[in-house]
Amino acid sequence: MKNNGNNRKKKISDVSLEKLNLPRDLKDLNYDQCEKLCSDIRKTLIETVSNNGGHLSSNLGTVELTLALHRVFKSPDDKIIFDVGHQAYTHKILTGRYKEFSTLRKKDGISGFCKPCESKHDPVITGHSSTAVSSAFGIASAMKINGSNNYAVAVVGDGAFTGGMAYEGLNNAGKSDVNLIVILNINEMSISKNVGGMAKYLSNLRYKDGYIKTKDVVEKTLNKVPVIGSPIKNTLRSSKNAFKNFVLSTTIFEELGFDFVGPVDGHDQKDLEEGLRAAKSKKRPVVVAVNTVKGKGYAPAEENPGEYHGVGSFEIETGNPDIVSADSFSSAFGNELVKLAEKDDRICAVTAAMKYGTGLQHFAKAYPERFFDVGIAEEHAATFCGGLAVMGKIPVFAVYSTFVQRCYDQIIHDLSISNTHTVFGIDRAGIVGDDGETHNGIFDIPMITSVPNTKIYSPSDYEELRCCLYNAINNDDGIVAVRYPRGNSKVTNNSPRTDYYYENNNSNCLVVTYGRLYNNVSEAVSEINYGENKVDLLKIVNVFPISDEIKDIISKYENVLFFEESYYDGSISQKISAEFDNVKSFTINGFVKQMSICEAYEQLGFSIDKIIQTIKEHL
């Protein structure tokens, strides 16, 4: 007997998260019990994220959907892939990780994203946008080769559908006959409000609730009409244009070869499960559109879903976050860009759905005609900047370090070869903390320094950031990156520079660093210099290309210790050590798991005490 939510195989009286055997017991709940379970899950989400920080709005919006997925499908035999993965908290709770959920995003705890090493219910690592369709299609294709009848299900938010890779996957998968189901979660809000023609198109799907029902009613009605009903139905089916005109219109997904189901109410458990079963019965690629409310169940998040997309800890009663974002490198960058744009109307600002995260909301308000949010499409953003530049504009692309990785080809092909002047404001450079491996910004230095016609600044405080941004826009050409970390800055005593700062204490040991790490290194050097031993200090601001002056300084020392918040291969210190035998590198090897920035610094040897210890060991 099939379980429809009310006809249960066994009776379950206690549906508390502590008592349920998850995910096995989910299929035996009735709809009233499902409603209570969803309420308990939302309480758990709010309590945990309020303590640990994390992605709140997206997870509150997908509670019923995730429950329906696990009731209709059988994980891990059926593979459920969450695009980006930031909306998979309920999935974690329902797949045996409830007792560990309080450790979310903490060191040695469970990740804020999906990881196969964490659970057999996480088929692939997710952390970046627009990848799920491609992954799910690959999995579904392998299942077919293996003779399996199981399903691959990709859960994709409408924000992720502003990324081109999603359409590459759809275009390729639509012509196949594999068991692939794509859940299109329409909530009209990604990190920043969705933009572009596709966002508008997906929003309009909300108003086509009768589309599939009308199709079904027409077919069932014609089937009952004697003699002429079936021929009419077949004629309509064989003529796509006639059928489109007869029943509203087709969707872009059907044009790509998918069947289309929905839109379905994403908070109605029965409708959700009926829609998913309908998709499952088709045994071919299907898109299911699901309408949800981001932040569902917590008023502050419903009213301001963008602000509660990714948050630090906050007070549940008031919804007030602990962190004042105005005091940050992102805000300093955004405010300075507005001042520069006031004097130079060539300056344009570009973001990939991160207006608020990168501090560009001020620019968007002041100069809307020169502000461009291209959606979650970093590749397009880089090439778009090239187009602006060849027409005499000065594009400034504000982007997180981890997302620069997505437009490496465009940086080479569309900017570097032609030596096109484009400025990258690389936010979240270095360790970012709780988001872990997929988000730490430790690869931008190795990546960008491998490209000709590039220059990189790495300021250590706000004032230095302002000077570097001015230089990048007004005094440089080609590709110029100004990279800066997450969070706020300490005030340094030395005057802001755009080249380097050198402190000569007549020592034979030189300590070198750049960026945020300078704060810890300089404190460590100061403490050592209070004693009998002395060390010299070099802070590089214009970190690449490596200037002859920097090389001259380094060549004079017997012992050079280089502390660098970057992956080692391709790092600045590796490049310098290739020329000089006296350089010892202290960098990052491998990926850094989720933990606080302070914990990561301690583990990597970048805390003040660890730096002091390292310097003393090499004196």
Image (cartoon, rainbow, N blue to C red):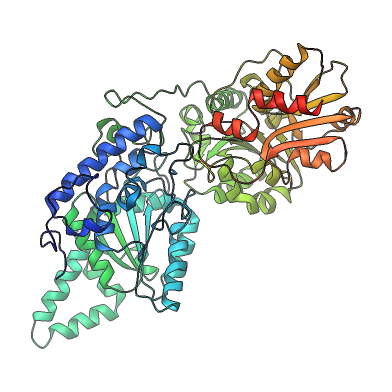
Q: Is residue 48 above or below residue 185?
A: above
Left or right: residue 513 versus residue 425 is right
Q: Residue at x 9, y 80 (%)?
A: 224
- Residue lying at the far bottom of the rendered structure: 227
Q: Residue 399 placed where, x, y %?
A: 56, 39
- Give the quadrant of residue 496: top right
Q: Position of residue 169 (x, y in %)?
A: 46, 63
Against 214, is 229 above or below?
below
User: Where is residue 253, by image quadrant?
Assistant: bottom left
Residue 4 located left or right of residue 173: left
Q: Is residue 327 left or right of residue 152?
A: right
From the viewer's side, name the closer residue of 367 and 47.
47
Residue 248 visible somewhere in the drawing = no
Q: Nearer the viewer, residue 127 or 355?
A: 127
List x then y, in percent, for residue 574: 78, 42
User: In this rendering, does residue 108 appear at all?
Assistant: yes
- Identify which residue is drawn at 69% across, 12% down: 493
Please give the name of the residue rendered at 43% of the width and 43% of the height, measured from the top-left corner: 110
Total number of numbered discs in the rendering = 0
Viewport quadrant of the C terminus: top right
Q: In the rendering, at what x and y percent does residue 445 appear?
A: 69, 41
Report the front residue among 22 and 314.
22
Front residue of this view, candidates 309 and 578: 578
